[in-house]
Each structure stands twice: as structure tokens, then as C-alpha cells.
């Protein structure tokens, strides 16, 4: 081993020990959020340095930060994205990929949590209902990944369970519409659990071999390990059944300790060694976002040190002077995109300490920053948070920062 390599490993070890052993302060996510918004294109309503579904995750990361910090300067980005892209593709953020639709549905559920604007919840519901049309009895159930119905994979089904269960909570599980969403979420989870996609190591492979309906042993991408955790948290919230959290803890224990997903103790995407495509830079952020949701849902917050350690490593090794982040959290810093920046925001938000009283964790709202003036672009003034007549039901108790295929579209 070279002296440079030994030095780097020693540095990483010291950072992790400092955070885990001394409870070092987790860096604020707000500078990284500012950098993420600088990459946003107001005219198009998305992040042009990454893909369509990745932009849904960038929006989710931004909303999570506003929910966690109480800093609402960027509510205008939520409204602008909705205005600019609602009629794209098939409308309502629906296209031929089930997982793409799921990412956007989750983003709009979060937008509803932030603003109380029921339009966002209705859009999410249309997306989730569309996803359900991809379910059939091939291989015993579950959703197809794409309209061509050639592949049943993990991410589409994990996303459906999470989005449908979250939607059920917000619609009210004691109401007909919410009860239907919950029944469907449980149906798909039960199928997924029995499908064989969760392997003997407690990790989720990419999908099923359609000809045999068996685990295809595809790469265990980090986001597949994450979204299932968020789905189980959502099911626990919707049903009140703690067994979903127990199952999530078992899966999280497996993935947070998986040697194939970590290099020198630092979360590393399987594609990083050879270079990831446009999709890969989003994956780790999605993973830690969902680990963070589980960490907040469990009384002992068992993954706090894990998340804080990763955040400290990325802050020290993968950050430019203006708080842009690349793909490799352990370094070296490489090309920055909205997807790599989204992952960093997800990590920093997830790593923030869990307050003793989650309902009091959000700081008083700051003034919303109006959308910048762009010549030729019509942007209306952002709707103030919870100013509509449809605020989230008071009976819903949500953590302060809750939230989602190896195939080319994510």
C-alpha cells in the first residue's frame, strides 16, 4: 500500500472517529442547498445537468431541507417546477416508466407537506393511480417497470409501496380513498417480500428474470437498499404496525454494514470505480435519505453515527470552496452535477441530529425569496406555506425530514 493511500485511509478513519466518538457537529446543509439551486434552470423548471427522474429527487432533497431547517427561501422552485412541467410527457409528471412516475409522486407528496397546497397531493394521487395500472399477476403480482411489460424490478415496486402508503396517510386511512391506497400498498409489499428480490444477505437485487420469475442477481444498487426502508416506514405510519419498522431495521443493518457497498467504511456506489452514468450519482443520496427516515422513526436512532460520519467525510473530501459536491464522498472530487449535489444535500439533511421532539424541530419560517426575474418567463408569486384551505390533517405525525433501477431511466 502506498504512503499516499495509507495517509488517506488514516484521514478518513480520524474523521469517522471524531464524529462517532465525540459527537462532532454535523455541517449545515444550507450552503449545499444554495449550490443545488444555483444549478436549477428556472426557464425549464428542472436541473439540466441531470435527467428527468433525477430532477424529481433534486426537488425532493430541496423540500426535505426546507422541512428540516424551516428555511423556506426556495418554495418558489417547487411552484415553478410544477408550473413549467405539469403538462410535460403525458401530464401530471407521468411517463412510460413506472419508477419515474413514482419519484415525482413522492416529490409532490413532500410539496404538499411543505405548503399545504392540495394540487400537489392530487397530482401525486394521479401518479400513484397510474402506477397501479402496471400491476398484474405475472410472477404472482407486482408492477412492471415500463409500458412494454418486459421487466419487473425492485425500484418500481418499492416506490409504489412508499408512495401509496404515504398517500394513504395524507388522504386518511379511515377514508375510502386512503383505505384503497393502503390496501394496494400492502398488496405490493407482500408480493415484493416474497418475490426473492431480497437475497440471503439481506440486500435487494435489481429485479426478476421474467422467464423464470426468480431473482436476476442484478447489481445491489444503493437506492434499492434505501427505498425499501422508506416504504416500510410509510407502512408503519399508515398501519401503526411496528413489525414493519423491525423488518426495516434488519434490512438497514445489512446494507449499512455491507462490504460491497462501502470502501474503507464510506458508502460507495458499485459503479464509482469505473464511472457512473447520469443515473448513478443520485443513488447514494436516495439511500441515505431513506436511512434517515428510518433513523428518525426508531426510538434509539441507531443510524445517527453512520450518517454523521458519512456527512463529515463528504464535507472534508468531496466539496469545492463554494459547496458543490461530486460523486466520490471519500474523494477525490470529480465532476459536479445536480445529481451529485442532490445526493450531498440528502446526506447532510439525513445526518442532522434528531430532535427530542420531532414536532418542534422546524425553525420559524423565514421569508420566502421571490423567484428571480427571467426575461420571457411568467412566474407568479409563490404561495405562502399553509395558506391554502387544505392544510395537512393535524392528526398526521410526520418526522421533520421524511421522504424513495439499475436500468437506464432510474
Image (cartoon, grey):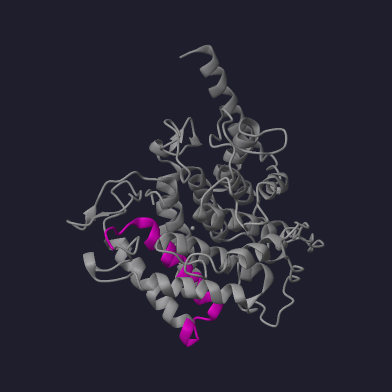
Is residue 396 something that shows in the picture? no
Q: Between residues 399 and 224, which one lies in front from this camera angle?
A: 224
Dominant SS of magenta comes to helix
Vertical side of 393 occupied by 361: above or below: above
Is residue 259 something that shows in the picture? yes
Give coordinates of residue 12: x percent, y percent: 57, 28
Give coordinates of residue 214: x percent, y percent: 21, 55
Please, which residue is most extreme toward the top here?
Answer: 3
Relative to 271, 369 lies left or right: right
Please, which residue is most extreme toward the right here?
Answer: 367
Q: Between residues 353 and 94, which one lies in front from this camera angle?
A: 94
Relative to 67, 182 lies left or right: left
Q: Quadrant of the N terminus?
A: top left
Identify which residue is drawn at 32% across, 61% down: 193
The total of numbered circles placed on residues is: 0
Q: Between residues 209 and 372, which one lies in front from this camera angle?
A: 372
- The answer to if 204 sits in the magenta stretch is no
Vertical side of 275 occupied by 251: above or below: below
Give coordinates of residue 290: x percent, y percent: 51, 55
Vertical side of 293 occupied by 34: above or below: above
Q: Between residues 341 and 30, which one lies in front from this camera angle?
A: 341
Please, which residue is most extreme toward the left here?
Answer: 212
Identify which residue is drawn at 42% across, 73% down: 130
Please, which residue is most extreme toward the front here?
Answer: 376
Magenta residues, start to end: 149-177
Give coordinates of residue 338: x percent, y percent: 59, 46
Relative to 387, 262 lies left or right: left
Amino acid at each position: 500500500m502506498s504512503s499516499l493511500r495509507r495517509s488517506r485511509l488514516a484521514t478518513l478513519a480520524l474523521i469517522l472517529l471524531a464524529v462517532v466518538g465525540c459527537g462532532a457537529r454535523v455541517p449545515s446543509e444550507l450552503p449545499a442547498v444554495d449550490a443545488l439551486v444555483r444549478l436549477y434552470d428556472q426557464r425549464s423548471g428542472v436541473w439540466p445537468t441531470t435527467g428527468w427522474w433525477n430532477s424529481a429527487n433534486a426537488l425532493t432533497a430541496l423540500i426535505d431541507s426546507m422541512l428540516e431547517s424551516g428555511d423556506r427561501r426556495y418554495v418558489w422552485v417547487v411552484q415553478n417546477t410544477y408550473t413549467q412541467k405539469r403538462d410535460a410527457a403525458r401530464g401530471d409528471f407521468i411517463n412510460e416508466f413506472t419508477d419515474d412516475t413514482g419519484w415525482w409522486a413522492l416529490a409532490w407528496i413532500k410539496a404538499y407537506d411543505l405548503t399545504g397546497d392540495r394540487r400537489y397531493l392530487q397530482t401525486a394521487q394521479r401518479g400513484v393511480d397510474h402506477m397501479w395500472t402496471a400491476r398484474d399477476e405475472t410472477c404472482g403480482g407486482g408492477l412492471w417497470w415500463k409500458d412494454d411489460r418486459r421487466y419487473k424490478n425492485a425500484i418500481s415496486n418499492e416506490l409504489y409501496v412508499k408512495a401509496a402508503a404515504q398517500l394513504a396517510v395524507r388522504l386518511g386511512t379511515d377514508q375510502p380513498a386512503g383505505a384503497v391506497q393502503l390496501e394496494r400498498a400492502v398488496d405490493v409489499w407482500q408480493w415484493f417480500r416474497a418475490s426473492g428480490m431480497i437475497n440471503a444477505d439481506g440486500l435487494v437485487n435489481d429485479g426478476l428474470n421474467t422467464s423464470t420469475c426468480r431473482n436476476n442477481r442484478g447489481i445491489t444498487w444503493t437506492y434499492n437498499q434505501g427505498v425499501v426502508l422508506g416504504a416500510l416506514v410509510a407502512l408503519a405510519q399508515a398501519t401503526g404496525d411496528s413489525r414493519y419498522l423491525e423488518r426495516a431495521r434488519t434490512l438497514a443493518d445489512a446494507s449499512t454494514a455491507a462490504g460491497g457497498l462501502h470502501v474503507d467504511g464510506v458508502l460507495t456506489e458499485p459503479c464509482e470505480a469505473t464511472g457512473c452514468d447520469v443515473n448513478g450519482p443520485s443513488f447514494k443520496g436516495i439511500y441515505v435519505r431513506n436511512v434517515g427516515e428510518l433513523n428518525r422513526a426508531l426510538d434509539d436512532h441507531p443510524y445517527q453515527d453512520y450518517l454523521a460520519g458519512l456527512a463529515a467525510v463528504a464535507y472534508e473530501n468531496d466539496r469545492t470552496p463554494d459547496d458543490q459536491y461530486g460523486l466520490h464522498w471519500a474523494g477525490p472530487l470529480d465532476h459536479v452535477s445536480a445529481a451529485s449535489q442532490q445526493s450531498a444535500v440528502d446526506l447532510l439533511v439525513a445526518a442532522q441530529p434528531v430532535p427530542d421532539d420531532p414536532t418542534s424541530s422546524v425553525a420559524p419560517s423565514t421569508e420566502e425569496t421571490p423567484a428571480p426575474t427571467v426575461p420571457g418567463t411568467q412566474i407568479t408569486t409563490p404561495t405562502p406555506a399553509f395558506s391554502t384551505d387544505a392544510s395537512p390533517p393535524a392528526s398526521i405525525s410526520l418526522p421533520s425530514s421524511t421522504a424513495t433501477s439499475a436500468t437506464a431511466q432510474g
